[in-house]
Amino acid sequence: MRAYLRLLGSGDFGRVWFGASVSLLGDGMTLLALSWLVLDKGGTGQLSLLGVCFTAPVVLGGLAVGPLLDRFDKRTVLIVDSVFRGVCVASVPLAAALGDVPTALPFVVAAVYGLLKMVPLAGFPAAIPQLVGESELDTANAMESLSFSVATVVGPALAGVLVGVMGAPNVLLVDAVTYLFFAAAVATVRRPLAPPAKAAKAAEAATTAEAATTAEGVPSTPAAKVSVRVVGRDKVIVATTAAFMAFNIADGMLLLVVAPWLARNELGGVFSLGALTATLAAGELVGASIAGGRAGRGSVRRIALCQMGAALGFLAVLAAPQAVLVGAGFFCVGMLSAPMTVWAQSLRMRRIPPEMHGRAFAALRTLMQGTSPLGSAIAAPVLVLGGLGWTAVVMVAFAGLPGLWLLRYSGQDRQAPLAGTVPEERTEVG
């Protein structure tokens, strides 16, 4: 707990984290509020289109966001994004106040949200190494994971209450305010969050000029150019990312298909679905708290063991209709998957060159989050054709086997990243 309190009181990081947490809470309200607007206009059949608008642009946006974060000061990128999206979201309550919300507007707002979703999801993690010390990375990443878990549950629940009290357009006005709150929090950051490459550019140019030729007059070999391909050659990064992508297929199967099916057919209705989601989030809170407060670094071995343990939690769906046992499995999945996220993110921050953090985090998060819908597509036919038993087996396979495969990379995380990929001031790390 002391580690968390120390970071909260550290100034810049504490303010940015709080602002990001408030903004995430607003994000959690957006989908429900926009969905309610579409339903109000008799557009039940258009809910799938709204879902596509929320998710499809994420890939395109993720590819574009990374270079921006590595080229410009992250404060500027985060502030511009928050103000722009806040204005876009505020256009809905403004239109409602002036008369009526155009039919297309909720879909446009959803598309803008999806297109720019990766700005804070990649921008904040990319800024963390510049806001905290190396020994505080696990704690900072745990706090980011905690705020995401809380917002995922509290945001939609709060929106459900507020829509009934003030109407969907005014709920979106609340979300617009949270964007501006985050922008204001980022604006208070004193230190620059410019790419490290800019700071080192002058020194690198001078060094290159002096060492243009060797003592024998032979031209020296130019320094390796840092690119995304560097990340692709890091076996530890590739292995953990691939394992997480597979785990998220199982996670998508569980949350998007199996949990709603269980709630409807085995556990007594929609209330149980909310309870299962909350139980999973509670497990994530516990797991992230433990991972962030624990001294020492998370290793690839620990990540692999947690992934295999979480995979066993998927078997709890077979205990239906015993709600307590099913809930225990959801809690287990959340509690063991959260440390995976915390430790793997810290691992990436230590191994990936700082000047690549924006591109790397945007690309990796886009890849990992993109497999959850695939899980949904797999789960439905398996559940229909093979029943709950085979569905559980498939989920355990997707979640657990990559963890077993990840064990082969145990110890490699202690080795230095590829030569030429880490700036001089970071070569002592790890």
Image (cartoon, rainbow, N blue to C red):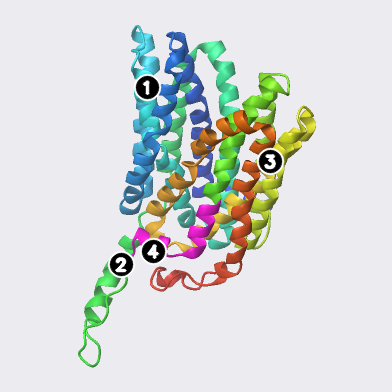
- Measured in 3D between alpha carbons, the distance from the residue under mark 1 to the one under mark 2, in whole angstroms, is 41 Å
Q: Amino acid at mark 2?
A: Lys
Q: Are marks 4 and 3 in contact (CB under 8 Å)?
A: no
Q: Amino acid at mark 4?
A: Val
**Does residue 1 appear in this view?**
no
Element on which disc 1 rests = helix
**Does residue 67 appear in this view?**
yes
Residue that carries the numbered disc 3 in the rendered image: 314
Residue nearest the observer in this picture, 380 or 101: 380
**Which badge, 4 or 2, is on the more N-terminal residue?**
2
Q: Among all residues in the image, which is located at the extreme front? A: 385
Residue nearest the observer in this picture, 391 or 417: 391
Q: Position of residue 376 (x, y in %)?
A: 53, 33
Q: Nearer the viewer, mark 3 or mark 2?
A: 3
Residue drawn at x 41%, y 41% as measured from the top left: 118
Residue that carries the numbered disc 1 in the rendered image: 107
Residue that carries the numbered disc 2 in the rendered image: 225
